[in-house]
Image (tube, rainbow, N blue to C red):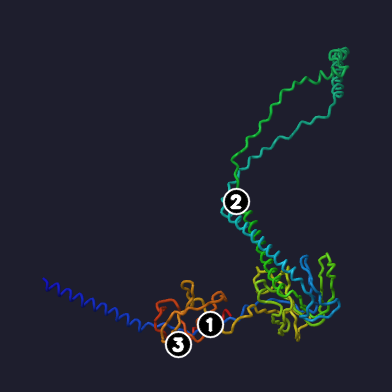
């Protein structure tokens, strides 16, 4: 018996060892024959050359720079005189820096007020959206009242008496007894007003007036909105939030401009021209007219519009490109002025239609074949700080783990390793900027699937990933 048990244990040990060895051999075989294809980062780079915006404009030689002052702005010094010729960049005036700081404080208070009102409106909207509408009260049936009134002619006591006497006379004539009329007079004593009143006005006894009972107050009054009323309240609150959002964005832009003024309180000429109007700084007009006006003297300009989302990137001095509608001739211009407030005119361009747009003026230094009144397409490059060495990979090649981004990179020894990268903005909706961690000379693998593991052997792809190239060309 003991001999049989010993044989069984030896057999199990041999089989177990063989199984473990077999699994190890299989694992070793699989590792040797499992390979992950890798592509060069350069071939996967989508590229990015900035966020361009296009709009249309008209070439003109009739331009003017107008400077308005509000009640809080104070001018410290004026550098020009009426009739003086100025060029782009010449100083015109300087604001008092103390008044600018005061404006900044007031604008910050305005923004805080708008934000508080927005929070109140958001709470009100949330309450309305979670409110259960009350049932509509049934309307009471309307009963038409009989408004027909007996109409009688205005009859005075004298008229009634005459009618009564006439009737008595008629009756006496028919009966043949002329004394009946006199008997009637005597019987009723109609020759006195007092007797007549006793005949036609019966005595009326006044009954005590009972005090009216006050209706019982309905203590169970339903408070709320019907379905239709609730829908109207929600719409009204949403419209209020929309208006508050516009006011907030406008105030924030004005605050940004004020802070820029605080850095340099000097206002410079944005066009070449002549100072046509200059008001008295100690006696400012109250009709809302401009304090200082410079009219263009020579050269051509173009006017267009820029979206509010680009105001922090596009400033006076930004170059733009123009293309003529008529001749397709191209030339460059430089933005010299951007309006302080949004334009009321409609916008025609490739930007966001829900954004506010600001009119800008650009000077065309070399107009070439362009003429006054000619329509042009305007191209404005949004991102001016785009690096030529920046890498933009499709998001599918970048994974996120514990708040950090990484790629599977070839380590130089033919194996995959996890490489953490620093990312930036997302462009085209599906490509992400890689700021550090890899270079264009590195090779990376698709980070999903059975081969997406550290230590897996790598194999460089035989061909460029044409599918990626096609998508890249379609989005650039």
The answer to whether 433 is drawn above or below residue 243 in the figure is: below
Q: Which residue is mark 1?
A: 45
- Across and down, in percent, residue 248 comes to 66, 64
Q: Is residue 380 above or below residue 214?
A: below
The answer to whether marks 2 and 3 mark residues whose Cβ atoms lie closer than 8 Å is no
Q: Residue at x 71, y 34 (%)?
A: 146
Note whether residue 471 is visible: no
Pick the residue in front: 454 or 49: 454
Q: Tell me the element at label 3.
A: loop
Are circles 1 and 2 on residues that touch, CB within 8 Å? no
x and y, in percent, of residue 409 in the image:
45, 82
Q: Position of residue 46 (x, y in %)?
A: 55, 81
- Residue at 62%, 57% (x, y): give it: 120
Location of residue 428 (image quadrant): bottom right
Give the spatial CA distance, label 1 vs label 2: 55 Å
| Cα distance between the residues tagged 1 and 3 | 18 Å
Q: CA distance from mark 2 to mark 3?
A: 66 Å
Residues 180 and 356: in front is 356
Q: Which residue is mark 3?
A: 462
- Mark 1 or mark 2: name the one nearer the start of the chain: 1
**Does 155 sit left or right of 145 as displayed?**
right
Is 25 situated left or right of 432 in this image? left
Q: Is residue 390 visible?
A: yes
Kindly identify which residue carries mark 2. 227
Q: Quadrant of residue 108?
A: bottom right
Q: Quadrant of the C terminus?
A: bottom right
Dot 2 falls on a residue whose secondary structure is: helix
Along the line of sight, the residue nearer the viewer: 473 or 252: 252
Instruction: Pick whichever of labels 2 and 3 is earlier in the sequence.
Output: 2
Q: Is residue 156 left or right of residue 122?
A: right
Callout 2 environment at 10 Å: few (<14), some (14 to 19), or many (20+)? some
């Amino acid at each position: 018996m003991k001999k049989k048990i010993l044989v069984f244990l030896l057999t199990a040990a041999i089989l177990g060892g063989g199984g473990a060895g077999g699994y190890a051999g299989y694992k070793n075989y699989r590792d040797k024959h499992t390979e992950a294809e890798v592509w060069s980062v350069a071939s996967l780079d989508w590229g990015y050359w900035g966020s361009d915006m296009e709009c249309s404009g008209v070439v003109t030689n009739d331009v003017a720079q107008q400077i308005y002052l509000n009640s809080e702005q104070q001018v410290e010094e004026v550098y020009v005189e009426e009739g003086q010729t100025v060029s782009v960049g010449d100083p015109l005036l300087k604001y008092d820096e103390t008044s600018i700081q005061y404006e900044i404080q007031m604008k910050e208070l305005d923004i805080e007020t708008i934000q508080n009102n927005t929070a109140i409106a958001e709470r009100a909207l949330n309450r309305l959206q979670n409110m259960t509408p009350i049932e509509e009260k049934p309307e009471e049936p309307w009963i038409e009242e009989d408004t027909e009134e007996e109409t009688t002619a205005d009859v005075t006591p004298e008229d009634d008496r005459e009618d009564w006497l006439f009737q008595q006379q008629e009756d006496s004539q028919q009966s043949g007894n002329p004394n009946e009329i006199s008997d009637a007079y005597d019987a009723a004593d109609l020759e006195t007003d007092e007797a007549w009143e006793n005949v036609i006005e019966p005595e009326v006894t006044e009954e005590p007036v009972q005090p009216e009972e006050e209706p019982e107050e309905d203590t169970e009054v339903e408070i709320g909105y019907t379905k239709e009323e609730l829908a109207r309240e929600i719409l009204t609150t949403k419209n209020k939030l929309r208006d508050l959002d516009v006011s907030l964005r406008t105030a924030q832009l004005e605050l940004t401009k004020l802070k820029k003024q605080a850095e340099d309180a000097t206002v410079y000429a944005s066009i070449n021209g002549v100072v046509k109007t200059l008001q008295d700084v100690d006696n400012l007009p109250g009709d809302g007219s401009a304090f200082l006006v410079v009219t263009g003297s020579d050269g051509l300009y173009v006017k267009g519009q820029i979206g509010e989302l680009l105001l922090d990137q596009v400033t006076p001095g930004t170059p733009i490109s123009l293309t003529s509608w008529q001749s397709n001739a191209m030339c460059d211009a430089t933005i010299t002025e951007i309006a302080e407030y949004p334009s009321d005119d409609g916008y025609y361009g490739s930007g966001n239609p829900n954004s506010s747009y600001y009119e800008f003026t650009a000077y065309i230094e070399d107009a070439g074949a362009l003429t006054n009144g000619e329509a042009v397409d305007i191209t404005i490059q949004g991102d001016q700080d785009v690096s030529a060495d920046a890498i933009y990979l499709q998001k599918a090649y970048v994974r996120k783990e514990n708040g950090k981004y990484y790629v599977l990179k070839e380590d130089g020894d033919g194996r995959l390793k996890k490489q953490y990268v620093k990312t930036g903005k997302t462009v085209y909706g599906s490509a992400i900027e890689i700021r550090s961690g890899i270079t264009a000379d590195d090779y990376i693998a698709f980070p999903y699937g059975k081969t997406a593991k550290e230590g897996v052997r790598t194999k460089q792809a035989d061909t460029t990933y044409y599918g990626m190239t096609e998508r890249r060309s379609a989005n650039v």
